[in-house]
Structures are given as C-alpha cells and as structure tokens.
Image (spheres, grey):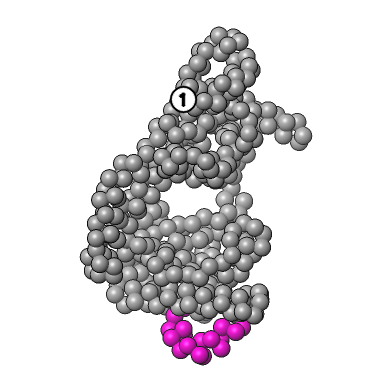
Amino acid sequence: MEIYRAYKFRLYPNEEQKILIHKTIGCSRFVYNYYLNYQKEKGIQKAFNLCKDLKELENQYEYLKEVESSALRSSIFDLEDGFNNFFAKRSGYPRFKSKFNRQSYRTSCVRGTYKEKEYSNIEVDLLTRNIKLPKLGKVKIRGFRNKDKIEGKIVNATISRESTNKYYVSVLVEEDILIEKIIPTTIVGIDLGIKDLVVTSDGIKYGNEKVLTKYEKRLKRLQRELSRREKGSKNYLKTKEKIARVHAKIKNYRKHYLNDIANEIVDEHDIIVTEDLKVQDMFKDKKKAFNKSLSDAAFSTLRSLIEWKCKIKGKIYYKINTYYPSSQICSHCGYKNSKLKDLSIREYDCPKCGIHNDRDINASLNILFEGLKLHYNLVSLV
C-alpha cells in the first residue's frame, strides 16, 4: 500500500542560509499575491498558464531569479488549490499572504542520472544529521534519532520559519508499506469529553490535561506586557517572541499527549469506534469558558490521529452517527432517558432496570454496541 508520510526536522541554517530562506519566503509570498491580484482583475486561469507567465515576471523583477524556481511555481499551484477549495465550498475566497503570518515555502524533489549515478536535489542523511536542499546546500538537522535512514521516495520539502525564530523542514515521502490483514478480536468504544478527555468502554479514563489553562496566567501577563510596548520596537518583538514560545510549548505538549493516547488505544485494540462529532457546531451558542475548554481538548486532532494510526497498522476504525444519543440510553436495558441532556448529571440510576451508571462509561459502551452493528452489517455485505 502506498502512503504519504511527512518527517519534520529542526533546521539549523547558518547566516547565509537564513538570508536565502528569508528571500525565498518573501519571493514566494510576492508571486502568490501578484497572481491572486492578477486573477481578480483578469479572471481565473490554470496554474500551468501562470507558470509560463512567471518567466516574464522574473525578467521584470530580477530578484526573483536569486531564489529556488520550484518554490515560486509551488506558490502558483497553492493559489490554484485555494481557488479549487473555494469553488468546492471547502474554504473561503483566497486571501493575500502577510509577512506576519506563518512563513514557509515548498520545493519539489527532482531526480536524474549522471554518469550512471543517481542524483536528487533533496537528500536526507540521518547518520551525519544533514539535509541537502536546492540553493541552500547542506543544512544541519535534528530529529528522528531512532532512525538510520528514511525509506521511500522524497516528493517535496517545506521549509518554515516559526514565530519563535526557529527553522523547520518537513519532508514528504511516498512509502510503499505492507499492511497485514488482521482478524479482529478486540473492540473499544470511545467517548470524548471535557472533564475526562477520553473514556473507553473498558472503563479507562484519560484525563484532560487542560494545557492552555496551565499557561493562561503567563500568557495574560506577557500579553499585558506586549500592549505596553511600543509597536515595532526591539522590546515589542522580544515580548512577541516570548508569547510565541509559550504557544509553541502548549502545542507541543498537547501533540505529545494526544499521540500517546492514540498509540495506546490503537495498539491494544483491533476495532476502534468513536462519535462523529461536529466540533464546529459545538462552539455555537455556548459560553466563552466552554469554548476555550473545547478548543483546548482538540477532539478533531485526536480522532484524526486514531484514524491515521488505524490505517497504517491494519486496524479498523468506525465513526457512529453524530446525533446518536449515546449518553441518554442505558447500556444494560436500552431505556432512553431524556433528562440526561443535562450535562451536570454525571452518575444516575436507570429508572427502568435500576442499575447505577457512570454517564461517560455508559456512553462509551453504547458507542461500542453501535460500532459492532456497523461492523457486522459491513461483514454480512462482503
């Protein structure tokens, strides 16, 4: 099975390489904004036609020739993707790029043969901890200490400069992996929540770390400090970088925690069942504190991780109907109690069978049963 996998490394460029990275990012942004304005005035055109026009633009603006040409063409194709997403109603109308947002550019991998020796303009050497990139040459990297080399064919590399003044490179690789078909023997239902992030039908609860809440005081202090700084001054930029570092710490902590949960669940079970929650709808008509907790929980990220890990490990993943009332139905007798719409009720006795239920474990059991129904229906169709 062919899959695409990204390997992200910390990049350590020297001063000359940093200057070239900044130039390439700036030129890529300029090309994107130029052709966005061009298409607003003259109508939508195919990316291939715009790439032909790019040569004339390079003659008009000589500095565009200083940077990697593939990065400029990638900006044009990114713009085309933006318009395609807009017309398919997956996103809004493409907007002009700002130098104050995330800074990055993408370069494609080109291969060839010279004197019976294979050549590639992007090469990763994990033994010497170096990566070869177009125009930049060899740059030091850190990451993936458990690997000696990257298997598969490199497709492209995305070089980025974060607001923390750190540089990263994400290498996209096409891999051909062998996924063994498994005979499922274990199944788990998962209920996602704010109080406990994950509650499984096995009775295991993974607490909500509430990472944002832990750093909230520090962020407020730094944001007050930033508001007192003169905009654009050195102290303003220093404080802004401090804020960015705190946000990066929150992001990395959350990512690590969610990966640990997803790995544990997928490794121990063959069939995983979750709710197909409409997270965006959950933000509507709610209190600010609830929205902040909901955003901090990152349900969509966790489900995406579980789904991806199931795919590459040969496990089975199901999402049940969004509006299935898993919390209101008794998992023992099937009685539906509409009073349980009140989220403050965490434990209760079933009015019909009298059994004592934990709200979240009961919901995860109902999700498991729905997953079993889906599985047997699909198996019977094969």
User: Which stretch did the figure color magenta?
Assistant: 52-68
**Amino acid found under the numbered disc labelled 1:** Ser
**x, y (%) of residue 258?**
43, 41
210, 159: nearer the viewer: 210
**x, y (%) of residue 155?**
54, 65
**x, y (%) of residue 209?**
37, 37
Residue 187 in the figure: left or right of residue 227:
right
> What residue is drawn where x is 63% and y is 34%?
323
The furthest residue to the left: 235
Magenta span contains residue 93: no
340, 228: nearer the viewer: 228
Q: Quadrant of residue 164?
A: bottom left
> What residue is drawn where x is 64% and y is 28%?
370
Q: In this picture, is 287 found above or below 16?
A: above
230, 56: nearer the viewer: 230
> What residue is drawn where x is 61% and y is 79%?
41
Circle 1 SS class: loop
Residue 72 in the figure: left or right of residue 223:
right
Q: Quadrant of residue 315?
A: top right
Q: Is residue 349 visible?
A: yes
> What residue is drawn where x is 64% and y is 17%?
334
Residue 175 in the figure: left or right of residue 145:
right
Magenta span contains residue 56: yes
Q: In this picture, is 104 found above or below 113?
A: above
Q: In this picture, is 374 found above or below 118?
A: above
Determine which residue is flagged by label 1: 344
**x, y (%) of residue 183?**
63, 32
